[in-house]
Image: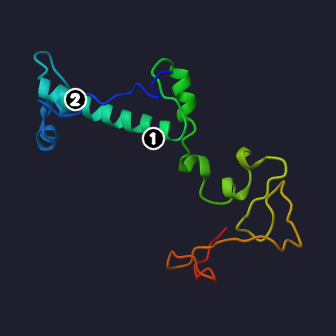
Amino acid sequence: MADPTNFLQFNPDQNNQLSDEDYSSNTSRSNGAVTGIFESPLANKIFYQTTTLVAALATAMVNKGYEMQDTSLAFLVSALSNILTKADIGTGVGSVCAGNDARLNQSGMKVWFYANVAPTGWTLLTGVTDAVLSVKGGSNAYNVSGGSQAGTL
């Protein structure tokens, strides 16, 4: 079996590359490369930075069970689409927390909602006596009373 990722860091020992300070003030970095010699310390810094970020992202996805290879753009897009962002989760009513997300639309699924009524398509369970909900309080600790923090809809 191949390694779970073939995205590797370029120049991991940072040999012959610009320092952060020199890179920040380098005119080729800020104005773009021009005709002529492209100095290796600058190229090494550029390749080091970009491959460090890519290798870190690929490794994080491997740690979550995804195989990350550069053999297929479509495969990578599919794997990276599993990263949830604020755009996926939302910030209020109509968000995944309000229950309209397909990931929550599974037969028999029970979910806690911070609301006085069930979201559209969901039903409130009554008579539930064996459920536990842990609530972080104002001190960001799990308190018996849940603290005094209040949410809004």
User: Is residue 95 among the parts visible in the rendering?
Assistant: no
Which structural element holds mark 1? helix
- Would you identify the image quadrant in which residue 31 lies? top left
Which structural element holds mark 2? loop
Number of residues whose C-alpha sits closer than 10 Å to that of mark 2, classed few (under 14), some (14–19) or many (20 or more): some
| Residue that label 2 marks | 11
Q: Say left or right for 119 vs 40.
A: right
Q: Amino acid at mark 1?
A: Ala
- Would you identify the image quadrant in which residue 99 lies? bottom right
Looking at the picture, does residue 93 appear above or below residue 137? above
Looking at the picture, does residue 72 appear above or below residue 122? above
Q: Residue at x 88, y 70 (%)?
A: 126
Quadrant in which the C terminus appears: bottom right
Callout count = 2
| Labels 1 and 2 touching (C-beta < 8 A) | no
Q: Amino acid at mark 2?
A: Asn
Looking at the picture, does residue 4 appear above or below residue 84? above
- Would you identify the image quadrant in which residue 25 lies? top left
Q: Say left or right for 128 vs 115.
A: right
| Residue that label 1 marks | 60
Q: Earlier in the sequence, mark 1 or mark 2?
A: 2
